[in-house]
Image (cartoon, coloured by chain):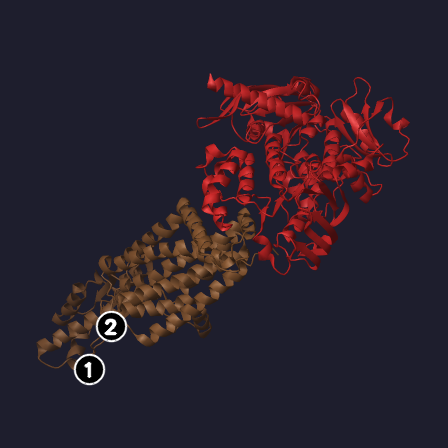
Amino acid sequence: MTGLTVRAEALQKRFHDRDLGTVTAVDGLTLEIRSGELTALVGPDGAGKTTLIRMIAGLLRPDAGALQVLGIDVIRDPQAVQDRISYMPQKFGLYEDLSVQENLVLYADLHAVPLAERQQRFARMLQMTDLAAFTARPAGKLSGGMKQKLGLACTLVRSPDLLLLDEPSVGVDPLSRRELWKIIQQLVDEDHLSVIISTAYLDEAARCAQVFVMNEGRLLDQGPPATLRQKASGLTFTATPPAGQPARQLQARLIDAPDLIIDAVPQGDNVHFIQQPGADLADLLGGAAVQPRPEELEDAFMILLRGESEGQPISTPPTQPAPAMPARRGDGPVIVVRDLVRKFGDFTAVASTSFDVARGEVFGLLGPNGAGKTTTFRMLCGLLPATSGQLEVAGLNLRHARAQARARIGYVAQKFSLYGNLTVRENLQFFGGAYGLAGRDLRDRIAAMTRQFDLEPAAKSGLLPAGYKQRLAMATGLLHGPEILFLDEPTSGIDPLARRAFWRTITALAQTGVTIIITTHFMEEAEYCDRIAIQDAGEMLAIGTPREVREKAGPEGAKDMNSAFIAIVEAARARRAGQVAA
Amino acid sequence: MSAGGFSRRRLVALVRKETRQMLRDRSNLVVGLLLPLVLVLLFGYGLSFDVRNGRIAVVMEDSSAATSSIVAGLAGSDYLDPIWTNSMVEAEGMIRVGRADAILRVPPDFTRDVVSGGAQLQLILNGVDSNTAQSIESYATGAIQMALAHIADRQGSAAPSGVTVVQRVWFNEANTSTWFLVPGLIVLVMTLIGAFLTSLLIAREWERGTLEALFVTPMRPLELVLAKLAPYLVIGAIDLVMCLIAARYLFGVPMRGSLWIITLSSMLYLLVSLALGLVISGVTRNQFAASQMALLASFMPAMMLSGFVFDLRNVPPVIQMVSQILPATHFMGLIKTLFMAGDYWPQILRANAILALYAVLLIYLSWRMLAKRLD
């Protein structure tokens, strides 16, 4: 049990890209990972987490350095390592056209699990993952969370000497995430399994015995979460803005002062922030009440990362907010939804949903995988007709005036859906043209957008860093001056730093009067919203300000949005199960 | 624990997996079983280079017993369909608008010249479609010569020209292109399965990320290669049986070589074709690119350059050299000989040796390509 599972020395891995030249993904990494423990790799995008895991799995050959896994030189004999470890890649590695049982049997055969042992092992895995009722179902027909649990079960058809999990919780809702962690925790406690997991969630890393913080291919720090946390000791506070002032506004002000503030996020009606050591915050806080709060792993992580980009602001705040083009005021809601229903065959994706969104609001749609968020979203954008119900967007009925309504909304898809081989300017010109902008108007809008989002017009879109790609996508969605901007899971798979920058942009946009509708898996991001709605199984479970929703969840959910979400969804599911039973 | 080598149990598990995947994807079965059937029927019945009812405009500028017996000879042919016209101008007009494929002109002093010897007939062919023109030329000259022989016979003299040419076509005596096309179709169908089905297999696993998970198991690359080939060999064998039955009973193509040599050679070519598909799949790692490349690198050349349609002796030397690189060319030559002529051992041995070499090379390449590395 003692001893090392992984031992890396001066490990180096470079990739050659025709456009970007040579990229160093892992740069002189030296680390030792102990066996029988849960170890987390955390770091922003491009930190080298996946590359490191793939090298450990023997899938990539390092350019320099030494790497021993389970005492074997993995560079010389990758197969010997692969015979003893299990690995779940980001895409799970399931055969979608094979059933749950067939996937399990395939991996059991490949790992030569004896038939006698197999039945017992399968039974345990199926029970742990709650998949026992679905053994005959093709993997492709499972929900995202179930797929992920099956992926994990397939890697665990026998007890490996080392389990590698590459970002298993990307794009998975909090409920599924919690179930996944329950399984992992159980395996570590009962079987003393060695697990290495890479993750973008710091709360997940906080459950691990050891945490390695990586950035740009190098190791920033390592240690148990409790030790790492101490970096933020004495620097973490909660600020309560004066009555009537939204927390988001105070948060924006704080995060725009990088000399004084390391990080700030809205939390409930307050703002959690980390100050620079010895900073004088009296002016900046301007009357907000401040109280110290216990430091968390995420605080230490932010301090480490901000130390890397010394003094630079987290995001370039919009210097010159482009005017919200059409000044069609007239108060009253900008989106009206009444008894909205959408059925696919006899499956009800959205059941009788009603809500309003006021002008200039940031409105968040939350829900587990398959809750009906995407369907609701597509109906609001006019991409999908409703089965029944009333739907008004920007004062226009979507049933009759879909085209006019579409001219007043902007849409940013989950995937980067711009042309990668065109420049920023060419993409903007094309989409501007598609919206009917031309000549001087188009030039002016492009100039305003590139200025607002700090984009270089001549840069090739496909080569932009992830954060800038997203800015370009938003610039494209805002080009025609829409009243409403729709964003579909814009922060999925993005690290905390990039997420801060993204939300800073959103906050600034909301100030210019644009209404924003957004879906997200990160519950703490709900705190940036004015109001949120929680959906599950097509039903609207809760709607209101983040605080109202948390209060609705009862004492269990009141502490943060993540637990509130879980409490609300579970209560609704229990109610439904009760109805079915009765 | 590091077993070091090949495991039959893993192979069986992988073969089972590939078979299930193949059977569950309906498009596989459509391309693998239905498309070959359609091709066989289409090529067997629909595509034919034979000319029937070639329209020939006849201009009679002389009228006698001799000329009418010539014309009767034309009308008696299955392959020709004479149209009577009044003048050369009218006939030329017909050829121009495409209502006639040829003109036969009987000049005014034809009867007199037949008696004195040195009679002439004018045959004008529309050369736009040279294949048709050639066929009509030979049918027409054949019919005219027959008629002339009849005239000579009736006059009690020897044939007007001293030599009588007896034409005979070897092997394809019926001279029907079905006989010539159907054996070639086996090549095409075997190529199709490799090009369209196996070329997607590895690419799909790259795209879906399943290969990455599979790599980090005790599985050996060769096991995966063999497992991917196995179910498609079965599909190919079914197609082969289908082609052979159609050739024999539907189209009456002779099968002069031994059945088992035809079968073994076809299966060997199938293996080459499947392995080529796997190599393409492994190089591109992308289903769309793989299917495009397979089309360009295996199916099209097999159709155009293997001698399926065009006789390779008539193409420029460069193209000939290219065609010799294609495994399809060697198999095409072999299968046609086997069907039409019989077992000709030097060719059987040579072609199969070349195919075996390709099979080994391509399987080796696809094995290397799955060397369990992502970079």
Given residues B241 and A138, the one toward you in this image is A138
Q: Is tag 2's residue or tag 1's residue first in the polypeptide sequence?
A: 1
* Eye-nearest disc, 2 or 1: 2
Q: Quadrant of residue B338?
A: bottom left
Q: Position of residue B119 (x, y in %)?
A: 20, 77
The label shown at residue A517 is none
Q: Which residue is mark 2?
A: B169
Identify which amino acid the numbered label 1 is placed on.
Val
Q: Chain of mark 1?
A: B
Residue A366 in sight: yes
The answer to whether A209 is drawn above or below residue A577 in the figure is below
Given residues A327 and A114, the one toward you in this image is A114
> What color does chain A have in the rendering?
red
Local SS, label 2: loop
Q: Which residue is mark 1?
A: B163
Question: Quarter of the image containing the C terminus of chain B?
Answer: bottom right
Local SS, label 1: loop
> What color does chain B have in the rendering?
brown
Q: Position of residue A187 (x, y in %)?
A: 60, 39
Q: Position of residue B206 (x, y in %)?
A: 54, 51
Q: Quadrant of residue A250?
A: top right
Q: Is residue B325 left or right of residue A534?
A: left
